[in-house]
């Protein structure tokens, strides 16, 4: 019985850690576009408002939290 419980706890722990998405943060700036490519989500940010846009991958939660025109990374912190 204890062995079965230990296996169950280990499987649950692996399932929870496997779902976390940890991507590097992009540059701070204004979100100019959002791109969804299958199950991959991207934000396009213009850090200096000079047309030098940067595209980077984010989690689906960050993708949904940040709208066009919002300030990144403030939109994911709110």
Image (cartoon, grey):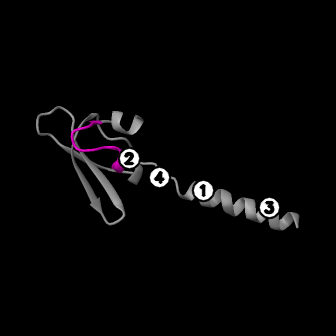
Task: Estimate the x, y position of residue 19 in percent, counting from the top left.
Answer: 53, 57
Q: Is residue 18 magenta?
A: no
- The earlier-in-sequence mark between 4 and 1 is 1
Residue located 18% across and 43% down the image: 53
Residue located 36% across and 45% down the image: 65
Res. 16 mark: 1
Q: Nearer the viewer, residue 26 or 70?
A: 70
Tell me where the magenta segment starts and ends, as one range.
Answer: 63-71
- The earlier-in-sequence mark between 2 and 4 is 4
Task: Estimate the x, y position of residue 61 in percent, counting from the top left.
Answer: 41, 50
- Residue positioned most to the left: 50
Quadrant location of the N terminus?
bottom right
**Whether residue 64 is situated above or below residue 39 in the rendered picture:** above
Task: Estimate the x, y position of residue 17 in percent, counting from the top left.
Answer: 59, 54
- The earlier-in-sequence mark between 2 and 3 is 3
Residue 75's image quarter? top left
Q: CA distance from mark 2 to mark 1?
A: 19 Å
Residue labelled with disc 3: 6
| Label 4: how many Cα within 10 Å (few below 14, some 14–19, many 20+) | few
Q: CA distance from mark 2 to mark 3?
A: 34 Å
Instruction: Give the number of the mark in front: 2 or 3.
Output: 2
Residue located 47% across and 52% down the image: 21
Residue labelled with disc 4: 21
Q: Secondary structure at mark 1?
A: helix
Q: CA distance from mark 3 to mark 1?
A: 16 Å
- The earlier-in-sequence mark between 3 and 1 is 3
Q: Secondary structure at mark 3?
A: helix
Residue labelled with disc 2: 62
Mark 4–mark 1 CB contact (< 8 Å): no
Q: Secondary structure at mark 4?
A: loop
């Amino acid at each position: 019985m204890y062995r079965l419980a230990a296996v169950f706890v280990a499987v649950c722990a692996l399932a929870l850690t496997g779902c976390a998405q940890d991507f590097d943060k992009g540059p701070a700036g204004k979100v100019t576009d959002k791109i969804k490519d299958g199950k991959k989500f991207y934000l396009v940010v213009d850090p200096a408002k000079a047309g030098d846009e940067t595209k980077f991958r984010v989690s689906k939660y960050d993708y949904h939290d940040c709208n066009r025109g919002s300030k990144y990374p403030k939109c994911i912190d709110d």
